[in-house]
């Protein structure tokens, strides 16, 4: 593929575009194989009393089984009617990662504030770990009422008033704002995945999925993102435009 682009189209082919030719499920398989091998070796050493802690072996083997079982989803990608989960997550993943990173910063800021201000008066905010776990539970709608009533105004009136404002702001911001935005990203990705004419992402995929360049003129179909056949003229025209632009820049 690199030679074709270099000699025929005079275009560089980046590593990121080459990467699309490799299945990401292979990386999952390799990772799970490494973990299950390490867990098996640890289990053998445990049988001979070389090591004494069995928790590491259980963690390694259990994690390997989790990934090996998840690989079954790979074969569902061949059936468009039942691969909605993998198609949606594949499209939504980049945006979800960026959204979660921004939300995590805000969430950690609330956790620190709750620990510093309410840690002395509220049993659920005594440590930073307790503060994080409490706010995460509240975020999922769990134990909200008990969190409110465990701080009485007789203990400290200022802390009581602050805790009410703190919890109201946190719940309103995260439940009505952050979670709804998170859900909207997933819904948008699902709607895009349902569109059969989704554009193909890069030059390699345009080449692979263009009908006349494949055997018998039948294009391969990437059912996880697109079923649109692309004319090779798209590639050639784009290559000509790039060469023309580069020549104009040289002049």
Image (cartoon, rainbow, N blue to C red):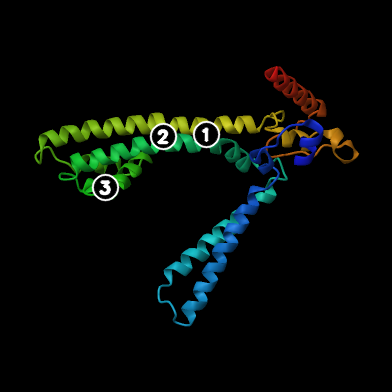
Where is the N terminus found, in terms of image quarters?
A: top right
Residue 141 marker? none
* Labels 2 and 3: the sequence-earlier one: 2
Per the image, label 2 sits on a secondary structure element best described as helix
- Measured as percent of width and height from the top left, residue 14 is found at 66, 38
Can you name the residue that lies furthest to the right here?
Answer: 216
**Residue 102: numbered disc:** 2
> How many other residues sit within 10 Å of disc 3, few (<14), some (14-19) or many (≥20)?
some
Q: Which residue is drawn at the image coordinates 86% and 37% (left, top)?
A: 218
User: Would you name the residue on which mark 1 appears?
Assistant: 95
Front one among 71 and 219: 219
Q: Position of residue 43 (x, y in %)?
A: 50, 74
Element type at mark 3:
helix
Q: Which quadrant of the view contains residue 31?
A: bottom right
Q: Which residue is mark 3?
A: 128
Vertical arrangement, residue 199 with respect to residue 45, above or below: above
Q: Tell me the distance, in whole angstroms, between the alpha carbons under discs 3 and 1.
A: 28 Å
Could one spot residue 1 in this view of the protein? no
Secondary-structure class at tag 1: helix
């Amino acid at each position: 593929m690199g030679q074709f682009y270099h000699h025929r189209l005079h275009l560089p082919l980046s590593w990121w575009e080459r990467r699309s030719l490799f299945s990401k499920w292979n990386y999952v398989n390799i990772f799970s194989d490494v973990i299950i091998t390490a867990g098996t070796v640890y289990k053998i050493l445990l049988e001979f009393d070389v090591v004494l802690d069995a928790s590491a072996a259980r963690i390694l083997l259990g994690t390997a089984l989790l990934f090996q079982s998840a690989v079954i989803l790979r074969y569902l990608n061949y059936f468009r009617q039942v691969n909605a989960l993998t198609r949606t997550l594949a499209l939504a993943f980049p945006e979800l990662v960026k959204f979660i990173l921004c939300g995590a910063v805000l969430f950690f800021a609330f956790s620190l504030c709750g620990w510093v201000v309410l840690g002395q008066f509220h049993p659920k905010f005594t440590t930073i770990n307790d503060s994080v776990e409490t706010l995460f539970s509240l975020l999922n709608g769990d134990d909200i009422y008990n969190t409110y009533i465990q701080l009485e105004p007789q203990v400290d009136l200022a802390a009581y008033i602050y805790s009410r404002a703190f919890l109201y702001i946190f719940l309103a911001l995260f439940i009505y704002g952050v979670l709804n935005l998170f859900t909207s990203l997933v819904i948008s990705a699902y709607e895009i995945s349902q569109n059969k004419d989704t554009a193909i992402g890069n030059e390699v995929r345009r080449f692979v999925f263009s009908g006349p360049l494949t055997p018998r003129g039948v294009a391969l179909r990437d059912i996880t993102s697109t079923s649109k056949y692309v004319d090779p003229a798209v590639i050639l025209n784009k290559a000509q435009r790039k060469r023309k632009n580069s020549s104009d820049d040289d002049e």
